[in-house]
Amino acid sequence: MMPLEFDLFTWTVAFCVAMVAGLVKGIVGFALPMIFISGLSIVMPPETALGALIIPAFIANGLQALRHGFSLALATVKQFRMFLISGGVCLMASAQFVLMLSPEMLFILLGFPVTFFAFWQLIKIDVFQVERSREKDILMGGIAGLIGGVSGIWGPPTVMYLTAIALPKVDKIRIQGVIYGLGAVALIVAHLGSGVLHSQVLTVSALLVAPTLLGFWVGDKFQGRINQATFRRLTLCILLVAGLNLLRRGMGG
């Protein structure tokens, strides 16, 4: 295990990325892992960036999941238990391959979900409607878990599925929070086993909790004072550029 030695510039960038990720999460309720991965990968190895996002993501998603109360969160867990079980198993399995992959392949695997999600949201492709079933829960949970294990980002397939089964917006936001929160728990367990989340990365991740929560708190306060549609579109444009840059680095550009 190589020691992690970050200079002042790296720490400054990391704290700023964490604060921005929390701010966006507080305002529009998404994109924290994607901003973390895209920003931190500029100044640290991709596997370290993946590990560093885990504790802040766990806490921020936990706060979002419990925003509507513990009883509703528990009901959501029961309602989507097959999605969560399938996703958790596949996430833990795919996470074990992270340290076996080359940095270039990791950049591609990190950049693809960021780019795809931002592009899909910006051009507003309509997701065809499907009837929810146990089999679809298992399938889509598995896909989200496989992607999340190696990238830390399981939001795009989750959002697509919840949109396709035509959930009301309020329910969708609550369910996303619960899925992301429990996904972060699975990610912690998986990467403690994979070796990504070793003691040094745990320290980095823990130190980034404070700026993330500060940004989250500020974003939550300003949630009703800014044009969310404009802010969301700006965020997606930034994510698109960041995702394409990750892909460029993965392809040796």
Image (cartoon, grey):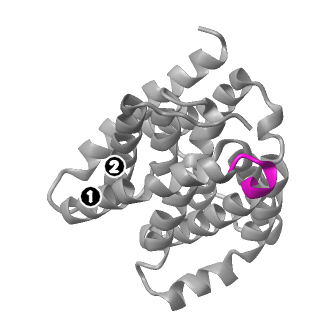
Contact flag, marks 2 and 1 (Cβ < 8 Å): no
Q: Which residues are magenta?
A: 191-197
Element type where label 2 sits in the image:
helix
Quarter of the view holding residue 248: top right
**Residue 171's x, y, as percent?**
48, 73
Looking at the picture, does residue 51 appear above or below residue 29?
A: above
Q: What residue do we see at 74% from left, 57% from top?
A: 192
**Residue 22's x, y, as percent?**
37, 54
Amino acid carrying label 2: it is: Met
Task: Depth check: give the residue in front, 21 or 83.
Answer: 21
**Distance in Å between CA atoms under marks 2 and 1:** 10 Å
Q: Which residue is mark 2?
A: 19
Q: Is residue 253 visible?
A: yes
Q: Which residue is mark 1?
A: 219
> Is residue 186 shown left or right of residue 20?
right
Screen quadrant of the C terminus: top right
Q: What residue do we see at 46% from left, 79% from top?
A: 66
> Is residue 149 shown left or right of residue 4?
right
